[in-house]
Amino acid sequence: MRIKLTIVLSLILSSSLYASVVDELLTEYRATGVETFSAKAGKALWSQEFINAKTGKIRQCTTCHTADLRNEGKHIRTGKIIKPLAPITNPERLTNLKKTRKWFKRNCKWTLGRECNAQEKGDLLLFMQNFNGE
Amino acid sequence: MCTTKHSVRIWDLPTRVFHWLLVASFILSWLSQGDDRYLDIHVFAGYLFLALLIFRLIWGFVGSNYAKFCNFTCLQIGGYLKTLFTSQRQHFLGHNPAGSWAVFIILGLGLIVALTGLLTLGGEERHGPLAGMISFELGDSLHWWHDSIAWFMLGIIGIHILGVLGESWLHNENLIKSMFTGLKSTTTQSIDIPKHSLTTIFLISSLIVGMASYFNGYLLEANYRPFIGPELPTNPAWQAACEECHLAYHPSLLPARSWQRTFAEQAEHFEEDLYLEPDDIAELQTFAINNAAENTLTEVAWKNNRSIPPEQSPLRITEVDYWVTKHQDIASAIWQLPEVNFKGNCKACHLDAEQGTFEDSAMYLPE
């Protein structure tokens, strides 16, 4: 019983440490008036196709990151290999506030043609954080 | 009197080995020139060529009878040419006057070609025994002389070959075969010269040792680079900011005005936003300007800068004239390979792209 409790407690502790950047961001997004976030909506947005106005070509998050976040991606324009986005395989992900903010801005602008709103960003964050293969 | 012909040895073994190795090194240097990927082979052929010439100069004093310069017949050229197409034409067992001239001219031109080659290597590439002793400019103009004199030498060798064929035909003897066997058949008495096996063994073993020490990197190291360039200045902030999306191009690849423009337009960097803070920009820009192409840290820096008109500030390295000419022969199928992806992906083909040195022989084409 004691052992089980310690395991559960330490799990909660470590996951909360590890989720702090995500939590901070989610709190920030909530402050703008969004109430709930959904990983399912995040998943849908992740593979949604956007037709770029200038080039007429399809752009998606998966264009560079692939659909399975545990895999390496590749920058479609420069060929640079992108390490997995899922914290489950790459614990460094979503641990640097500045970095996550910057890439959200950049990647939403390039993919959607506009910045993502708080709801979308929160959904995407939950989806990424909990990604374990589905 | 009976005039039976008999064979005598005219060319000693070292002279013959020298002759054919010189031919081989000359051919090798032609085959390996013009493509920077094979510069190390070209330089090896050049060293071999120079070493052989020096050997031949020494052998011209200490070698056997017909190899000695003092027995050359240069001064009899007048009489030789006058009677060449008459029945009184003269026959020489050793080098005839035209052949003697050919040896001296080829030795002389060869030394000039080898020397200008060493100077080009030292000036333009900053390698070899004369590395960095002369400027890029001087190295570049000596490169022109190196090429031109080599072409001239090719012409002289053409004449030499025609002469050998003509003489063989006129005297009904196979001079080319003689340069292999060392033998000529003659009716006159002649001294039979010694073979000089020991000197030959020395020649051949020097060649083997030389080759082994020059090329052993290919056997011992994966991704072996024959030329290692200078260590260029780096900056962690630059590395971090640029590596996010692609190779952190070394600032020596473009002039300062190009980098100033890059930072001025950082919010629209090829459709991407770099999101650099003013502090970051100040640091990155200082690093870029201090090491920009004008500072000629490398051959690429010097050549890229030289080929950009002063009124232009290109944002792309891949639009600079020098870059374009160096890569124009690469098939479009190669640019489309997934591991190449885009022209600015220098790493796909240059082993030293991260260091920014872009040395010759460090590039390869992906399959």
Image (tube, grey):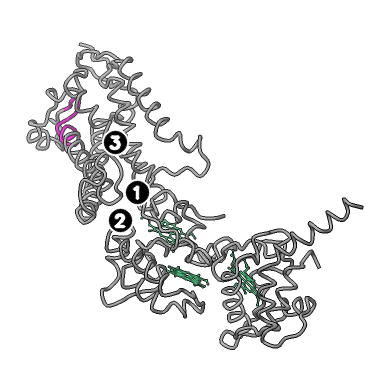
Chain identifier of the residue bearing label 1 in the image: B
Give the residue number, with chain letter if any, for mark 2.
B297
Q: Which residues are magenta?
A: B91-102
Q: Residue at x 23, y 15 (%)?
A: B3
Instruction: For mark 1, give the secondary structure.
Output: loop
Using the image as rendered, state which of residue B180 and residue B129 is in the foreground.
B129
Mark 1 crowdedness (10 Å alpha carbons): few <14, some 14-19, many ≥20 = some
Q: Nearer the viewer, residue A24 or B296?
A: A24
Q: Please give left or right for residue B127 compared with residue A9 in the image.
A: left
Give percent across and percent down for residue A70.
72, 62
Quarter of the figure that contains the C terminus of chain B: bottom right
The single residue placed furthest to the right in the displayed view is A1
Q: Residues within 10 Å of mark 2 (few under 14, many from 20)?
A: some
In the image, residue B212 sits, relative to residue B322, either above or below, namely above
Crowdedness of circle 3 by 10 Å Cα count: few (<14), some, many (20+)? Answer: many
Q: Amino acid at mark 3?
A: Phe
User: Which residue is the site of mark 1?
Assistant: B230
Horizontal relation, residue B159 to residue A62: left or right? left
Name the image quarter holding the N terminus of chain B. top left
Which residue carries the number 3 mark? Answer: B49
Mark nearest the camera among 2 and 3 is 2
Q: Is residue B232 above or below residue B305?
A: above
Q: Decide whether residue A71 is among the magenta residues.
A: no
Residue that appears at 56% across and 87% down: A54
From the viewer's side, name the closer residue of B111 and B315: B315
Q: Chain of mark 3?
A: B
